[in-house]
Amino acid sequence: MANTVLVTGADGFIGSHLTEALVKKGEKVKAFCYYNSFGTWGWLDTLPPEIKNEIEVFMGDIRDPNGVRTAMEGQDIVYHLAALIAIPFSYHSPDSYVDTNIKGTLNVLNAARQTQPKRLLVTSTSEVYGTAQYVPIDEKHPYQGQSPYSATKIGADRLAESFYRSFGLPVTIVRPFNTYGPRQSARAVIPTIITQLLSGSAEIKLGSLTPTRDFNYVKDTANGFITIAGCDAAIGQELNIATGREISIGELAQELIRQINPAARIICDETRLRPEKSEVNRLLGSAEKLRALTGWAPRYTFEEGLAETIAWIRGNMQAYKTDIYNL
C-alpha cells in the first residue's frame, strides 16, 4: 500500500528530484511549494506531465505554522527540505535564515506532534561540521557554525533532536554532503563553472580554488532519503549521505574546462571569496553508518553525474544568468 508523503521544499533542487523519485516509487505525494503570486511551482514545472499530474501541490510558506500543520495532516512520511541555503546571502540577511531554517523547522516539528506522521526526516547539511577536524567526517564530528547559514542548520538539527528525545517524535536527521546535478541553481559551484563555460566565456570567475568537497549526485541523494525513510532503525539517528571521495574546487574546474572548453582559464573574483574564518576548507564524509543501517551506496560515479549535469545544463541555458554573480 502506498504511503502518503509530504515533501517541503519540493519546488527546489533536491526536493524536485525527491518528489519525482517518490512518484515513480508509487507513493501518494503532496508537494509543499513556496507561495508566490506568479503561480509557479519552481522546478516541478519542468517535470513531464505523467509525473506532474500525480503530484498534489500545496502552496504555502514554511514560516507559517498554520499552513504547515494543514499540509501535514494525514501524511505517513514527511520529508522536510524547505530552507534558505545560499551561504553568501546569509552574510547580509541572517534574520531570514533564522526565520526559515530554525522557525520553519520548529513549525514542522510542532505540527508533527499534532499530526503524528510515522516518519519525519529533517534535512541537515555537511556545512554544520565546518572545516574537517578529522577525515572522513562521521556523525560524531564536532559542529562549527562558520556562516549564519550553517549556524541556523545546527540550530534546526538540535531542535529536531530535542523533539525526538522530549516527545518521542520519529525523527531522523539526514545530512547530505554537497549535492549536484540537473536543476541546480548557479549559486552552487558546479553549475557556476558549467554555465560560464557553455556561455563561451574564456575567463571563468571563481573564489578560492583550494577547498575540497565530497559531491553527491542528486539522484543518489534522493535515493538516500527514500532508503532512510524505509528503515525503522534510523529513527533518532543522524545520518550522513556522502561518497567518501573529495576533489578540490580547482581540480573540479580544470576537469570541466577539459570537457567543455580547453581554451578557458580561471581568474579569481574577490567578490566570490568567503571571509577567511568562514571558508570551509575541507569536507570529506563517511557514510558508513548509513551503509550499515540500510545498505545504501552511490549508484552514480562522479564522472557519470557530471556528464548528466553538463548535458542538462546545455539544454537549459535559458534558466541561467551567466553575466552576474549568483548568490
Image (cartoon, rainbow, N blue to C red):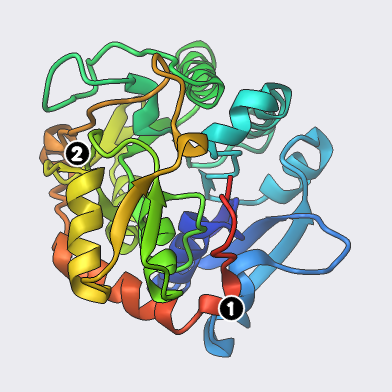
- Identify the residue position indicated by label 2 in the image: 290
Total marks placed: 2
Label 2: state its secondary structure: helix
Q: Is residue 90 above or below residue 168?
A: below
Mark 2 vs mark 1, foreground winner is 1
- Identify the residue position indicated by label 1 in the image: 318
Provide residue 119's location: percent of width, then percent of height: 46, 41
Neighbour tally class for label 2: few under 14, some 14-19, many 20 plus, Cα within 10 Å: many
Neighbour tally class for label 1: few under 14, some 14-19, many 20 plus, Cα within 10 Å: few
Position of the C terminus, as image quadrant, is top right
Say what amino acid the circle numbered 1 marks: Gln
Residue 2, can we see it? no
Cα–Cα gap, marks 2 and 1: 38 Å
Q: Is residue 172 above or below residue 43?
A: above
Q: Which of 58 and 93 is in front in this view?
A: 93
Rendered image quadrant of residue 285: top left
Residue in the picture at 35% in, 56% down: 190
Residue 277, can we see it? yes
Label 1: state its secondary structure: helix
Q: In this view, does 15 lie to the left or right of 288?
A: right
